[in-house]
Amino acid sequence: MKAAEFSLRDPFILLEKDTYYLYGTRSETAWDDHADGFDCYKSEDLENWEGPIEIFHRPNGFWADRCYWAPECVRYRDAFYLITTFGSADRKKGIYVLKADRPEGPFTLYSERLTPEDWTCIDGTVYFEDGKVFLVYSHSFEDSPTGDMCCQELSEDLTRAESEPKLLFQAKEAPWAMPVPFAKAEFGMDGDVYFTDGPCVFCKDERLYMTWSSWSARSYAVGLAYSESGTMEGPWIQEAKPFFPENGGHGMVFADKEGKLQFALHYPNDKYQEHLLLTELNI
């Protein structure tokens, strides 16, 4: 089937042994309190997809029952690791790692909570730099209405954080980012409320970039930042205009079989209608 024929949010694509694996948030349970799993889809050509293949199902008694968001699969050493968000009614959303022997799972819980217990954190991604593993994530607006993008160094085995959180930038620093207009109506929050989500860190032409999402003058959008130092340390400089300006977001960058960098995101950002959209990266 074609990508437009099935719905998912927060797409992430892994190329492994000439097969593309697509992961994402289940659209039908993204906002409910009864989420129970993750799926993947397989393709040889990025056009025709097989699936869904359930790669994780909530075990009996597992504490997390909602916010099964933004799974990202990376091959690391001799296994596959799924970096994802979990939440429940009595625990703040946080980032965890699952592990499997194959990209299509089955995955099992592998790490402790990687982000601070008293922080609401979503949308983790990992970046490897000079032998170090960095977890990049959004410190969510419920705690931080300035819209904070943060990182922490992880242990080599990805089971725990090895450093305190570091603030990389705030959404309000980007000229294109706007306060969400529905903060009072949906979340009961007064004043300006910004958010960050969907970070993706990648290199192109010897420059370190990050795509990330927030609210713009034309709804959900993707922005682009680059590190002035060329490292995770930053400082991170925001492009003035959004990279993808309207009604789509949570993008990521990957190299296809020909070595071309592709940008994947979900579009439109309308409930139960989201699907994978691919464009060749042009920056």
Image (spheres, rainbow, N blue to C red):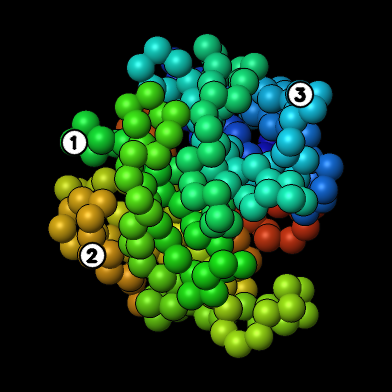
Classed neighbour count for the residue bearing mark 1: other residues with Cα under 10 Å, few (<14), some (14–19), many (≥20): few
Q: Nearer the viewer, mark 3 or mark 2?
A: 3
Image quadrant occupied by the C terminus: bottom left
Left/right of residue 224 with respect to residue 48 in the rendered view: left
Residue 232 vertical position relative to residue 217 in the rendered view, above or below: above
Of the two numbered discs 3 and 2 on the same chain, state the one appearing first in sequence: 3
Q: Amino acid at mark 3?
A: Pro
Residue type highlighted by circle 2: Pro
Q: Label 3 vs label 2: CA separation?
A: 42 Å
Which labelled disc corresponds to residue 235?
Answer: 2
| x and y percentages locating residue 122 in the rendered image | 56, 52
Among numbered discs 3 and 1, the one appearing first in the sequence: 3
Q: Identify the residue at image location x=62%, y=78%.
A: 180
- Horizontal and vertical percent position of residue 9: 66, 48
Distance Cα–Cα, label 3 vs label 1? 37 Å
Q: Which residue is mark 1?
A: 130
The circle drawn on residue 92 is none
Q: Position of residue 46 (x, y in %)?
A: 55, 32
Residue 138 visible in this rendered orientation of the protein? yes
Of marks 3 and 1, the one in the foreground: 3
Q: Where is 24 relative to 43, above or below? A: below
Q: Which residue is mark 3?
A: 59
Question: Residue at horizontal 61%, vertical 67%?
Answer: 142
Q: CA distance from mark 1 to mark 2?
A: 18 Å
Quarter occupied by residue 270: bottom right
Mark with earlier residue (1, 2): 1
SS for tag 2? loop
Figure quadrant of residue 21: top right
Question: Is 223 situated above or below 138?
Answer: below
